[in-house]
Amino acid sequence: MSSMTNESEDNMSKGHQDSPSTEETSGGNMGGGAHLKKGPWTSAEDAILVDYVNKHGEGNWNAVQKHSGLSRCGKSCRLRWANHLRPDLKKGPFSPEEERRIIELHAKMGNKWARMAAELPGRTDNEIKNYWNTRIKRLQRAGLPIYPPEVRMQAQNVSQESQIIGTLPTGDTSSPDILKTDNFEIPDVGFKNLELTRGFLSYSPTLLDMPASSMVKQGVHSSYSYNFMFPTIHSPKRLRESETLFPGLDDSVSSGLPVFHQYVDYACENMSDPFLSFPYDSDINAYDQLPLDVISGSHALLNGNSSSSEPIAGALKLELPSLQYSETRQDSWGTPASPLPSLESVDTLIQSPPTEQTQSECLSPRSNGLLEAVLYESETLKSSKKYLCPKTWDTSVMPGDVVDSPPLNPCKTEWEAKGDPNSPLARSASSVFSERTPISASSSDEPHLVETMLGCEVKPDMVNRVSTQDVQKKKIRYQMEFSRPDALLDLSWFGHGNGCVNDQSIPTDAIAALLGEDISSDY
DNA sequence: AATTATCGCAACCGCAGGAAA
DNA sequence: TTTTCCTGCGGTTGCGATAAT
């Protein structure tokens, strides 16, 4: 929006601390103790800097202050020049092509803004970074995966292949990084995998494993595990919006994912099921389970903040940037433990919007192009300022309906629709941690849960608990998360067709009660 | 119309790597 | 070889603008 771009001219007066008096610079390398101005640049300062650069060329930024009289540190001068004054800068919003390129590059490089900028003439790393972070925020808020489902699917396929091949290395759960960090960084693996292929697949495993061991280990010690979870704080409003279940599922989608098959089918077949919403959430888990997801989603997210920087699988940093995404539930992915359909689900359902992943995945019908998908997404977001009502979809879109929308449409809608003010972002790791701490305590339940989940018996339990109080809900959620086995399990949980769900017979009412809302009404 | 929440951008901060002394 | 300085990078913060309530 508005920007301070030109602000330099007028904004001196604006807030920022532009008071010259302001301190000296930061720590940097500024050498002298002169008072260095901070805050927005004025047009006069810009002129001085431009003049200086024209005469002396770029570089030697610390000399600028000395020779030009500018009360700005070298760092600041360099930034100003690089981000705003360089003659070759391309101003204005990113074009669709640029956006596409950014997504593509991010998939390849992760948060390597400078490198990405090098690939985009006229664009700065800061611009790209801001663009990306903004995008991620939106998605996070919406509870959507950063990368479109399609993308994940593809990635999934790739990873699966690798698994089959036996290339998957064992994840190193105890990776130092992981363990030591509170933050969960989502690696950029997703795309990487896609492009890089198997070599990187290893990456997924790692992530997967994390949950199991890392989470548990860290459980009490750190908030790390929490990061995996979806933040899930969703306003009621969101809930509604998100209720969409599997709007336009398309079989094609499933084709890519063997693992998901059941799930997909289920979704398609049962869209009408009131209970869908529940499963829906669970998807998330399933979703998470996908390596890509983990990767992709995380990537972005974390990237978002997360910095995932290494394109390659190898680098899996787990940092939890401010943008922690729950998407990452990588744990689910490799972990044998978590079947949980959604544990979060419960909670999620209650508090949060439907899950992103699930939806998206399911939604993404025929998409095939990774980039296309991504792009699509980005565009969607753009246009989405007006959130569409998911409701539309929720109710109206049923498996059979799906339809004629462009491949990604469904996703798109959801994508946008899910904006949630209460998103994960808002949650701090610590808070989450505290919230979940109890889990560890209940860890004992994990085994049990896992089994149950698999056996489809979980549901009842869940239901009961759910119907109880929030505390219990949380508890369940925690348990579930920790216990969740893997995606497959989740799928099974849903059961094919009439599967477990029915068997479990989780009362729709109960769910509705849980959600406290519209589920029933929607259906 | 006023207030609050959210968005997007520019700038700052700290760290790391490389070069020079 | 070690120390210091400079540059660049990525993450974070702060602020104005805008949208929503």
Image: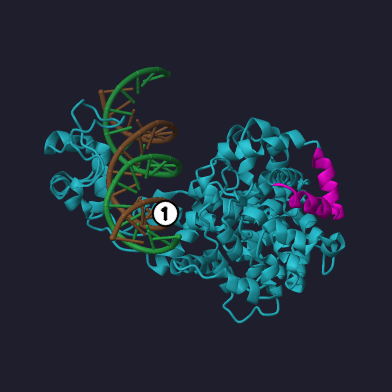
Chain colours: A cyan, B brown, C green
Query: Where does the magenta region start and end?
Result: A445-469
Which residue does the image show at 68% across and 76% down from the upper left?
Answer: A398
Q: Quadrant of the N terminus of chain A?
A: bottom left
Image quadrant of residue A99? bottom left
What amino acid type should be assigned to the residue bearing mark 1? Met
Q: Position of residue A103 (x, y in %)?
A: 48, 60
Residue in the picture at 63% in, 60% down: A354
**Between residues A203 and A324, which one lies in front from this camera angle?**
A324
Please state the horizontal and vertical placement of residue A157, each as a whole percent of the image.
69, 62
Residue placed under numbered mark 1 in the picture:
A116
Q: Quadrant of residue A261?
A: bottom right
A119 above or below B11? Answer: below
The structure residue drawn at horizontal position 80% and vertical position 55%, both measured from the top left corner, is: A489
Crowd band around label 1 with a 10 angstrom C-alpha radius: few (<14), some (14–19), many (20+): many
Q: Quadrant of residue A508?
A: bottom right
**Chain letter for mark 1:** A
A1 or A184, nearer to the observer: A1
Give coordinates of residue A436: x percent, y percent.
Answer: 66, 39
